[in-house]
Amino acid sequence: MLGFTIPSLSTLKLNVAVLSLSSSHSSAIKMWFASKDMVISLAILFLVLLTPCSTAFWNTQNKIKTAVYLSPKIEVGPGSVSNKFYYDIEFPRGHVAIKGFNAEVVDEAGNPVPLHQTYLHHWILVRYYESKSKLSTNTRHDLHRVVHMSDSFSNSHIITRNSGICQGNTLGQYFGLGSETRGTNTDIPDPFGIEIGNPAEVPEGYEEKWLFNIHAIDTRGVEDKLGCTECRCDLYNVTVNEYGTPLSPSYEGGLKCCYDQTQCRLRKGFQGPKRSLYLRYTVKWIDWDEYRTRLPLQKGGYVVYGVAHQHSGGIGSTLYGQDGRVICTSLPIYGSGDEAGNESGYIVGMTTCYPKPGSVKIIDGEKLTLESNYSSTTRSHTGVMGLFYLLVAEQIPHELCN
């Protein structure tokens, strides 16, 4: 244990890891980190120990700040798809540690919108640096390509990705969920937090900002709600992707068929009004200690939190260590009613892992296996997905291990 005496908040800087599996048609999918022909993103959010050895400093509850924001307006009509990028969203500013992030879709009156009306396919939260020069303004509308294709664009924007292993062109987000958003715990336990806004990390002439990608599918009046949410290509009458490239005949469904402004097939004669929706998001944070001390970054670390993301039909996801041990199992919670947060047939939450501090460690260079399972007993599924989020600390305070 390091003998620091720091007269302020104890916060450990976390690494955030996002593991990804996706398929256009599957009942069970696995991923090995060593495989070069699989798509993986390990996003690790990174924590630093800032405290003397006293458990009194570890309780941050009386220091947590909370703010509730609304995304820009999301306009949808029956069967329509909105999959847009919203830049420079409202977000806590300054040097802080994020302690939690929750979200849900609401209407203009602030009422929660149930999944059987508007399906929240996914939302992701991405950090980026934007040049203070006025020359950057003419590139803002192309930034959505940057998220998928590059870490910078014309020297005007720099995507600040998570610290995971998939650093090329995908899954750079810090947070992101889908239909399970309302029922999934995202609180980060003490003494940990996700550091943002460190002025020493912002390039000169730039400022830190955040963007949303929000993918919502309005399923009012559609022929097949599940088929629309699984983005079956025949229901969208789509044969090319959003860039006009023809799809393979074997591609039955997935993100390539439900891009922005596509339309899922409605029941004959159905008519319904357009509506304006918002993603209402709640952020919890604490001010970062200006006298913080950093620990050396290691590739491995102790698992602090874990949760999976699956689509309807999912039956659970497990992350295994190299020796076959279970690091975390996350199971879907299905709704049983009509009200928002308990919609029957939809995944409305995912169970989370909060291991006893110090009990689950990933060693440097360890090869992990991610398994995401779907049931195909009643029908095959298209557009299935398997993401896994991990928060990993490079050290655990001695007192927490006792």
Image: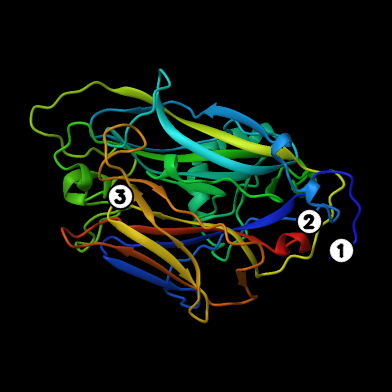
Image coordinates of residue 327 in percent, x first then y, are: 52, 69
Q: Which residue extends farthest left? A: 268
Q: Is residue 74 above or below residue 41?
A: above
The numbered mark at residue 373 is none
Q: What is the distance, in whole Å, between disc 1 and disc 2 at their CAs?
A: 9 Å
For label 1, the residue is 2
Foreground: 41 or 30?
30
Q: Secondary structure at mark 3?
A: loop
Q: Residue at x 26, y 65 (%)?
A: 27
The residue that mark 3 highlights is 244
Secondary element under disc 2, as helix, strand or loop, is loop
Which x, y percent locates residue 291? 87, 47
Q: Which residue is mark 2?
A: 49
Marks 3 and 2, the one that precedes in the sequence: 2
Residue type, mark 3 in image: Gly
* Element at label 1: loop
Image spot of residue 328 (x, y percent): 49, 64
Q: Are marks 1 and 2 in contact (CB under 8 Å)?
A: yes
Q: Give 156 or 39, whichever is nearer the viewer.
A: 39
| Quadrant in which the N terminus is drawn | bottom right
Which residue is at 48% across, 79% downward? 324
Pick whichever of labels 1 and 2 is earlier in the sequence.
Answer: 1
Q: Residue furthest top?
A: 109
Is 91 placed left or right of 315 in the picture?
A: right
Q: CA distance from mark 3 to mark 2?
A: 50 Å
